């Protein structure tokens, strides 16, 4: 439970033993809080928008910001490629 949630409920767990019921679901619950699903359309839109942003503001960006935005665009494009062409992405990764 998040610190904010414990504070709002007045729970103080220091020195306590916590028993987790339904522990077989614990891994799935933890994994579910640290992941998100992104569709191919969302990746495509993000890549298009970031490319447009970079092209429009390239001359105004500091070198660090330009590099970061271009690397982020590359990561999004790579993820998009892996979604669209998983067999090719796996083959190029293994080479």
Image: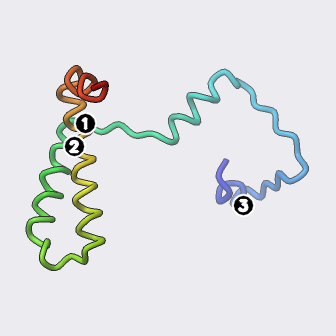
Mark linked to residue 7: 3
C-beta proximity under 8 Å, tags 1 and 2: yes
41 or 85: nearer the viewer: 85
Return the x and y of residue 83 as percentages of the image width and height: 23, 30
Return the x and y of residue 52 as percentages of the image width and height: 10, 61
Q: Nearer the viewer, mark 2 or mark 3?
A: 2
What distance separates the C-alpha of mark 1 from that of mark 3?
36 Å
C-beta proximity under 8 Å, tags 2 and 3: no
Mark 1 or 3 closer to N-term? 3
| Residue appearing at x 18%, y 29% in the figure | 84
Give the residue at mark 2. 43
- Callout 2 crowding tier (Cα within 10 Å): few <14, some 14–19, many ≥20: some
**Which quarter of the picture shows residue 70?**
bottom left
- Callout 3 crowding tier (Cα within 10 Å): few <14, some 14–19, many ≥20: few
| Residue appearing at x 12%, y 77% in the figure | 59
Give the residue at mark 1. 39
Q: What secondary structure is marked by label 1?
A: loop
| Residue appearing at x 87%, y 40% in the figure | 17
Q: Nearer the viewer, mark 1 or mark 2?
A: 2
Mark linked to residue 13: none
């Amino acid at each position: 439970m998040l610190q904010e949630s414990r504070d709002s409920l007045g729970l103080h767990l220091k020195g306590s033993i916590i028993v987790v019921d339904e522990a077989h679901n614990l891994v799935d619950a933890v994994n579910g809080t640290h992941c998100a699903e992104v569709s191919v359309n969302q990746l495509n839109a993000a890549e298009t928008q970031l490319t447009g942003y970079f092209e429009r503001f390239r001359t105004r960006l500091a070198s660090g910001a330009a590099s970061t935005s271009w690397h982020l665009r590359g990561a999004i494009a790579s993820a998009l490629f892996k979604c669209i062409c998983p067999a090719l992405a796996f083959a190029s990764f293994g080479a």
